Image (cartoon, rainbow, N blue to C red):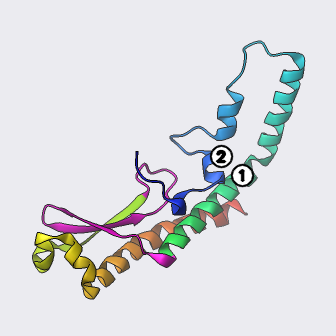
């Protein structure tokens, strides 16, 4: 099991769910007996009614939460990992996206041939300011694209 990263943990994003995970309230409603008592049926109906009436608010809160988590990471960019795949150096950092399994963003920074100091050990590239500036710039660009789209969606939700 991977380590827990607090910067990509939300509250409402987990309650609302996504295209691959059933919402917390739907999971809760699906539990129980097949022949509930009158009292249990009434309370379950009240619960379902409240969820239905406020579902839109929960979805807006989840969308806002997603952008807040994304902006927090975008504004700090301090947890960068480097990796090499074939002749390319990749940079990645945690980044919440509700419909993605991988909770990070990855970019190709450069070809390894331009950074011979990294061939023996990628950690050597962390001390190269030009390289790390390029990595941060490309990561930020990728994040900005996601953030802009999510802000557009939030604006549509609030109309």
Q: Residue at the spot x=84%, y=22% of the render?
A: 41
Residue 56 position (above or below residue 22) = below
Nearer the observer, 8 or 41: 8
Q: Residue at x 59, y 45 (%)?
A: 17
Q: Which residue is mark 2?
A: 15
57 vs 15, left or right, is right
| Left or right: 68 as drawn, with respect to 83 | right
Viewer-side label of 2, 1: 2
Q: Which residues are magenta?
A: 75-103
Does 91 lie within the magenta span? yes
Residue 112 in view (yes/no): yes
Instruction: State the separation of the CA atoms marked 2 and 1.
Output: 8 Å
* Nearest to N terminus: mark 2 or mark 1: 2
Quadrant into which the C terminus falls: bottom right
Q: Report the number of numbered marks.
A: 2
- Residue 61 image position (x, y, % from top left): 69, 58
Q: Which residue is mark 1?
A: 58
Q: Residues within 10 Å of mark 2 (few under 14, many from 20)?
A: some
**In the image, what residue occupies the spot 48% across and 66% down?**
146
Foreground pick, 9 / 149: 9
Residue 152 figure quarter: bottom right
Give the x, y percent position of residue 15: 65, 46
Report x, y in % for residue 132.
30, 81
85 is higher (above) or lower (below) than 44: below
**The one of 40 and 124 positioned closer to us in this rendering:** 124
Disc 2 on helix, strand or loop?
Answer: helix
Q: Is residue 148 visible?
A: no
Whether tag 2 and tag 1 are in contact, CB under 8 A, the answer is: yes
Task: Kindly indicate the quadrant of the structure image that contains residue 135.
Answer: bottom left
Measured along the vertical axis of the image, is residue 140 above or below residue 63?
below
């Amino acid at each position: 099991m991977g380590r827990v990263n607090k910067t990509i943990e939300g509250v409402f994003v987990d309650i609302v769910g996504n295209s691959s995970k059933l919402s917390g309230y739907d999971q809760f409603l699906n539990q129980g007996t097949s022949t509930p008592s009158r009292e249990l049926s009434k309370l379950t109906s009240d619960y379902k009614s409240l969820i239905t009436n406020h579902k839109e608010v929960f979805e807006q809160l989840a969308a806002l939460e997603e952008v807040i988590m994304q902006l927090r990471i975008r504004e700090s960019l301090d947890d960068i990992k480097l990796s090499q795949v074939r002749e390319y150096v990749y940079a990645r950092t945690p980044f919440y996206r509700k419909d993605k399994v991988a909770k990070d963003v990855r970019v190709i920074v450069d070809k390894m041939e331009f950074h011979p100091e990294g061939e023996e050990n990628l950690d050597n590239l962390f001390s190269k300011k030009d390289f790390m500036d390029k990595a941060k710039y490309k990561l930020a660009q990728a994040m900005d694209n996601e953030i802009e789209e999510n802000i557009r969606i939030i604006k549509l939700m609030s109309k």
